[in-house]
Amino acid sequence: METVELLNSELHAALRMRPAHQGADPFVRIVVGEFPAAAVACPLLFSKHAETGAFYAGALMGFRKGEWLIDSPDGRPAFRPLEADREGFFALGESIAFDPDHDRFADRFAGQEGESLFDAQGAPTASLKAVQNALGRLMANVEETDAFIAEMLAHRLVEPIDISLNFDDGERLRLDGLYTISLDALGDLDDAAALKLFRAGHMQSAYAMIGSLRHIALMARRRNERLAVPA
């Protein structure tokens, strides 16, 4: 479990952080407020928390740790999850805390390495404001996300998804422990249930998840294209 410290502009005036590690974890937790932007860039799926077994929603950014396969037409990813910006930071009530042992803060007081969190006047820098924004948006969407997942489970719409991929270099890859929403079960809902989900905004989120599955094949193609490029 992380040991966290409350962020303080005086105590941590010299604190610096490294940019978030893009693609460090291929499956990143997201909230429903991110669904519209994420669904046009990568697959949205459910997984279960390793300790509690509770479902959570996430965006699949690659097939292996450190791999980034979503579309980046101008050198920037088409979708950047809020979790990437808040990495190493936590919301504690109205305050922000950070994990001093997180590798984002390695050598955190050494010279000019990394990005400053506070300016000379003790005000948040643009980097810290990005963290504040990410934490605020995540917290604002937690309740709605939990409600969405609860409704999907209550209506028995969640089902395991089989992702088995073969690549041009002969590698076979299988991703286990992932779930999606059953399009058939969604279509079998009675009118009252469907209307309730629609009015709550859950139907839109459900179809966003289902439609995003097309990105699995696109990401596999990008991986094969990279394999074809000489090292």
Image (cartoon, rainbow, N blue to C red):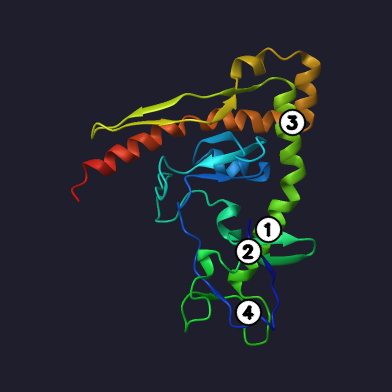
Q: Name the secondary structure under disc 2.
A: helix
Numbered mark located on residue 118 in the image:
4
**Disc assigned to residue 135:** 1
Q: In the image, which disc is placed on residue 11?
A: none
> What's the CA distance linking mark 2 and mark 3?
28 Å
Q: Splitting the image into 4 quarters, where does residue 32 fall? A: top right
Mark 4 or 1, nearer chain start: 4
> Which amino acid, mark 1?
Leu
Q: Would you call the spot at circle 4 few (<14 residues within 10 Å), some (14-19), or many (20 or more)?
A: many
Q: From the viewer's perspective, is the residue at label 2 or at label 3 nearer?
A: 3
Q: Position of residue 91 (x, y in %)?
A: 72, 60
Indicate which disc, 3 or 1, sits on the residue closer to the N terminus.
1
Quarter of the rendering containing residue 148: top right
Looking at the rendered structure, the kind of residue marked 2 is Val
How far, Cα to Cα, is label 3 from label 1?
Answer: 23 Å
In the rendered structure, the answer to whether residue 139 lies left or right of residue 128 reads: right
Query: 162 left or right of 11?
Result: left
